[in-house]
Image: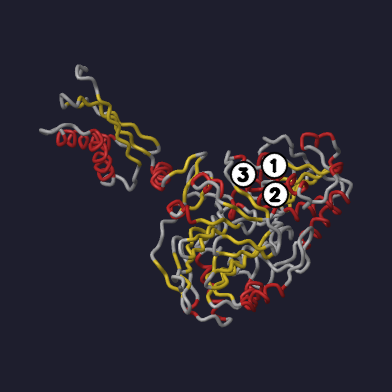
Amino acid sequence: MKEKYKPLKVAFLGGVGEIGKNLTAIIYGEDILLVDCGSTFPDTNAPGIDLIVPDFSFLVENKKHIKGLVVTHGHEDHIGGIPYLLKEIPNIPIYGSDLALAILNHKLEEKRVNTAKLNVVKGFDSIKLGPFTVEFIPVAHSIIGAFALAITTPHGLIFHTGDFKIDYTPIGNSKPVDISTFAKIGARGVKLMLGESTNIEKPGTTISEKHVGKTIDKIFMANPDKRIIVATFASNVNRVQQIIKIAQKDGRKVAFSGRSMIAISEMAIDLGLMDVDKKDLVDVDHVKDYAPNQVCIISTGSQGEPMSALTRMANGEDKVKIQEGDLVVISSSAIPGNEKAIYTVINNLYKRGAKVLYGSLEELHVSGHACREELKMMLSLIRPQFFIPVHGEYRHLKQHAKMASDIGIKASNIEIAEIGDVIEIKKNKLQRLDKVTAGALFVDGEDNLSHDTIKQRKQLSNEGMIVVVCDVNAKMRTIRTPITIRTSGFVAKDEINRDIELTTLKLFNEQTDGKPFDKNAFEEVLKKRVARRITKFVQQKPLIMPIVVEMDEDANE
């Protein structure tokens, strides 16, 4: 008997139209395979928020159909949301490289999540999850253990590039890219390619990681008498390895500073991914026991993060005290939006007497993402029937789609997805279906906050607040006057306060005219009326907070 036809679909729950919180669901019939589950950090539009993760509503509704989650690599924007997903849907089988899962396991322990089923895979391993067969293809990136994915489905092969660059001279445990591997995948016939788009605007090819090592080596040789502090991404194990070897060659002890730097370096050493003689390591508490030219500190904080080690040093709040003549090397480029924080740290380091080398002065960082020519090469090698660009803001996706069209993929076979889109892969076309619930969850401490809460925080920050306190006797249908009005971040003139009081009294009389007093309804209507009246006086929209205090029946009026 012929098996009933089941559609093949892709649902985009994160990572399109944005850089961060990557989450893709590949769906065959009812079965679901998840690729990555990341987070992103908030900007000024999310005051007081620690982290942003994808909205998991669609997955919670379909949790019994999830066959597994495959991780392309261990960066925050690809694994940072997993602890929060597992709180909603425990026991999802998760597959990734040893370093990616070690970093993830550390996060799970911090969040007290103990329901994870972590399975380490190596390059070229193949696993079967329901109707999906997933092959893990090693790629070069700014973290060890990054994979592209070749996913075999009953309707054909889906190829997901993950985050990658083509590096012919990698360092550490990474191997030179094997172009023939991608050519062989393309020769098998790829139905759909999902391609990362981060550096589509950058021409040429990405510089090898070795280039950074040469630059840092020159810096050490030129500053033999200085204490050297190097700030970089903790997850860039190959970068950290290069710095350690240069410091060892220079006869310096190495100290790690910052929680994530210490944790990830220890993981990498335990996994054999970092080659370092432990006698050359020193606890950061003992740095003061060595002469400046005998030590190198490798630190977090290259993005000016408020609680990072380098920021604390710059503010004079860290156990490592910046000294006159210290050399601080910031080995990273600014993630868009972080520029102000980074320059604040640099300014503060200068004030404390340090010399600072950073991106605009030295070649201290190379990207882990493919530039235009590498993206073009990947498309040409894979030669997919259908193409959907991912991992980029809308302009990145648009330019990547044009590139695909330029190399010969039919324009009708290319789609630009948005958060919540579901696209069915048919025999000869891509078809958009109804959107699913998707978006963002805002994490503040241990709590998830709604969009309404974020809106209120922004309104409070930008416009201020008016609190209207009403003492009422519901049974006697009386309200105490004068009404108590308090403001914060908003300057209320006498005429505004009088208007708020008159508005409050008028509404109270309306709502107690021959009917029982409804406290909740009164507060809701008063909020809207006061907000409307305020616009008559000023071009501000402060947060209005009515508070009804119900007095005892015998209370004095």
- Amino acid under label 3? Lys
C-beta proximity under 8 Å, tags 1 and 2: yes
Q: Residues within 10 Å of mark 1 (few under 14, many from 20)?
A: many
Quote the CA–CA distance across marks 1 and 2: 9 Å
Q: Is residue 350 visible?
A: no
Tell which of 195 and 542 is nearer to you.
Answer: 195
Going from N to C along the chain, the mark reached first, 3 or 2, is 3
Q: Label 2: how many residues lie within 10 Å, few (<14), some (14-19) or many (20+)? A: many
Q: Residue at x 52, y 72 (%)?
A: 155
Q: Which mark is residue 107?
A: 3
Residue 549, label in figure: none
Q: Which residue is mark 2?
A: 234
Q: Which residue is mark 1?
A: 258
User: Which percent across, then down, holds residue 233?
Assistant: 68, 51
Q: Residue at position x 10%, y 33% from top?
A: 514
Mark 1 and mark 2 lie on one chain; the one further toward the N terminus is 2
The reply to whether residue 485 is visible in this rendering is yes
Q: Residues within 10 Å of mark 3 (few under 14, many from 20)?
A: some
Which coloring applies here?
secondary structure
- Give above or below for 552 relative to 290: above
Say which residue appears at 81% left-offset and 60% top-offset: 214
Residue 154: x and y in percent read 53, 70
Q: Provide the secondary structure element on which disc 3 rests.
A: helix
Measure the alpha-carbon separation of dots 3 and 1.
15 Å
Tell me the element at label 2: loop
Tell me the quadrant of the picture where the C terminus can be found. top left
Q: Is residue 489 above or below residue 399?
A: above
Type of the residue with mark 2: Ala
